[in-house]
Amino acid sequence: MENLKTRLREDMKNHLKAGNRVELMTVRNLLGEINTREKGGKAPVELDDAAVTALLQKEAARRRETAQTYTEAGALDRAASENAEAEIIEAYLPAPLDSAAVQGIIDSAIASLRADGVELSMRSMGSVMKLVSAEVAGRFDGKAVSEMVRAALA
């Protein structure tokens, strides 16, 4: 399975050949942002798919917020452009989960910890969240996941 950065690079080449200007510009900006994050710190790092996904989520959210600001200011053409970019970015994100699926993941994490002989209480929230977060990873609101785990442990 190819990783997300490889897919972005391939798509950039395809958009360049096809002459898709908006898609090309958006994917180029994403790759530039990834490159900046990898080389911008004290020591170069290699972003894995989870880190790239988190970055893409932030970029999509930023585009949506900017589009909202443009809409409120009456600049509808600019808002449409930002929304188009957000949709291009969101196509690279994993499909979101519904609350029933997240509850199932929480229940199985709790069951697995209990099977390992762990006595669960509110103090165990961190270990449950660690298991759940690894599986949910950006496909559901983190704050809502935390509240669901807290309710399950109560």
Image (cartoon, rainbow, N blue to C red):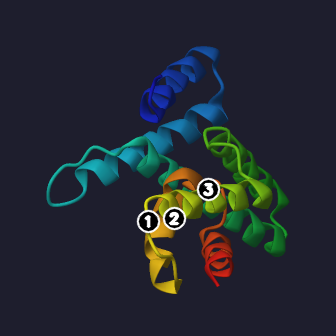
Would you identify the image quadrant in which residue 105 lies?
bottom right
CA gap, disc 3 and disc 2: 10 Å
Would you identify the image quadrant in which residue 70 lies?
bottom right
For label 1, the crowd category at 10 Å Cα-Cα, with few meaning under 14, some 14 to 19 and many 20 or more, is: few
CA gap, disc 2 and disc 1: 5 Å
Are the residues at dot 3 and dot 2 in contact (C-beta closer than 8 Å)?
A: no
Q: Residue at coordinates 68% horizontally, 50% vertically from top-left?
A: 86
**Left or right: where 100 falls relative to 12:** right
The residue pinned by badge 1 equals: 117
Q: Which mark is residue 108?
A: 3
- Is residue 132 among the parts visible in the rendering? yes
Q: Secondary structure at mark 3?
A: helix
> Which of the marked residues, 3 or 2, is nearer the chain's N terminus?
3
Q: Secondary structure at mark 2?
A: helix
| In this view, 122 is above or below 82 | below
Q: Disc 1 marks which amino acid?
A: Gly
Q: Which mark is residue 114?
A: 2
x and y, in percent, of residue 82 in the image: 70, 54
> Which of the marked residues, 3 or 1, is nearer the chain's N terminus?
3
**Left or right: where 120 falls relative to 149:** left
Are the residues at dot 2 and dot 1 in contact (C-beta closer than 8 Å)?
A: yes
- Is residue 133 among the parts visible in the rendering? no
Q: Residue at coordinates 23% horizontally, 48% vertically from top-left?
A: 45
**Left or right: where 126 falls relative to 39:** right
Q: Disc 3 marks which amino acid?
A: Ser
Q: Disc 2 marks which amino acid?
A: Arg
Q: Residue at coordinates 69% horizontally, 68% vertically from top-left?
A: 65
Q: How many marks?
A: 3
Q: Residue at coordinates 74% horizontally, 62% vertically from top-left?
A: 67
x and y, in percent, of residue 77 in the image: 81, 54
